[in-house]
């Protein structure tokens, strides 16, 4: 569970949360509040249930990764001990010391690669869960702002001092639970981490371009004359 929470904290920190207000609107904001998007996502029902499902569905991989990790750590400790012994010798055998250091480095790299390979299905499931929550976060934030009559929302790390009553993180969680009660832990074939957010961002860009292209016609402007 700790691995899942830690992974989520990192990914959710990079959520694509679109600006909700323009610069003039921010200057005129009357009601200001705070919300921690990462905390809101990790407290949501969708994330909590999905985390439990991942622990159950991928228990074999999680247990294998933990057991193999302990074995590899023990093997690495032996190599580190050999390096320390070489380092204590007087005079030092530089060739032996460098060989011992390389053995430690190579073992760390191979162990990390092996453990990452074992955990790939788990990591992909986690990424898919986070991605599904990410694409609905803006909607939850807007709904929470409307419910709390807030027109400017800040992240806590952007504020020096605050009153606890200004924090509407729980309201964001409530709206996220309403909008997205559950998510799937089974990524579709060919899924790449962050794919859903990228697709949503691309869709928003395409819609913005289409709106800009349609604006002259909607305003009744005269199209340029070509020769």
Image (spheres, rainbow, N blue to C red):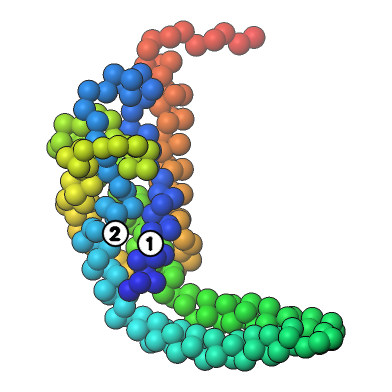
Q: How far apart are marks 2 and 1 (CA)?
A: 7 Å
Q: Is residue 183 visible?
A: no
x, y percent for residue 222 = 46, 8
Residue 224, given in percent of the width and then of the height, sits at: 54, 10
Residue 213 sits above or below residue 19 on the image: above
Query: What kind of element bears circle 1?
Result: helix
Quadrant of the rendering where the N terminus is positioned: bottom left
Please tell me which residue is depicted at 29% across the width and 59% down the height of the picture.
42
Question: Residue 224, can we see it?
Answer: yes
Rendering quarter of residue 72: bottom right
Residue 179 placement (x, y as % from top left)? 20, 50
Residue at 40 percent across and 82 percent down: it is 62
* Res 8 label: 1
As rendered, which of 45 and 215 lies closer to the eye?
45
Cβ atoms under marks 2 and 1 closer than 8 Å: yes
Q: Find the residue positioned furthest to the front.
A: 90
**Foreground residue among 203 and 30:** 30
Task: Tell me which residue sits at (37%, 34%) in the image.
Answer: 19
Q: Residues within 10 Å of mark 1 (few under 14, many from 20)?
A: many
- The tag on residue 42 is 2
């Amino acid at each position: 569970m700790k691995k899942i929470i830690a992974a989520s904290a990192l990914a959710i920190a990079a959520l694509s949360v679109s600006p909700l207000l323009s610069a003039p609107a921010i200057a005129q904001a009357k009601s200001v509040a705070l919300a921690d998007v990462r905390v809101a996502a990790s407290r949501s029902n969708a994330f909590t249930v999905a985390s439990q499902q991942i622990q159950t569905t991928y228990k074999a991989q999680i247990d294998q990764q933990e057991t193999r990790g302990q074995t590899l750590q023990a093997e690495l400790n032996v190599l580190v001990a050999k390096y320390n012994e070489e380092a204590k010798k007087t005079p030092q055998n530089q060739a032996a010391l460098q060989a011992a250091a390389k053995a430690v480095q190579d073992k760390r790299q191979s162990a990390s690669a092996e453990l990452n390979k074992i955990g790939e299905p788990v990591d992909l499931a986690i990424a898919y869960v986070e991605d599904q929550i990410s694409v609905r976060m803006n909607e939850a934030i807007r709904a929470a702002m409307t419910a709390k009559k807030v027109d400017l929302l800040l992240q806590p790390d952007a504020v020096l001092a605050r009153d606890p009553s200004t924090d509407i993180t729980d309201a964001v969680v409530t709206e996220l639970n309403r909008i997205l009660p559950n998510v799937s832990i089974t990524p579709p074939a060919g899924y790449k981490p962050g794919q859903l957010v990228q697709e949503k961002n691309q869709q928003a860009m395409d819609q913005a371009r289409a709106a800009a292209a349609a604006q002259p016609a909607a305003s009744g402007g005269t199209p340029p004359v070509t020769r």
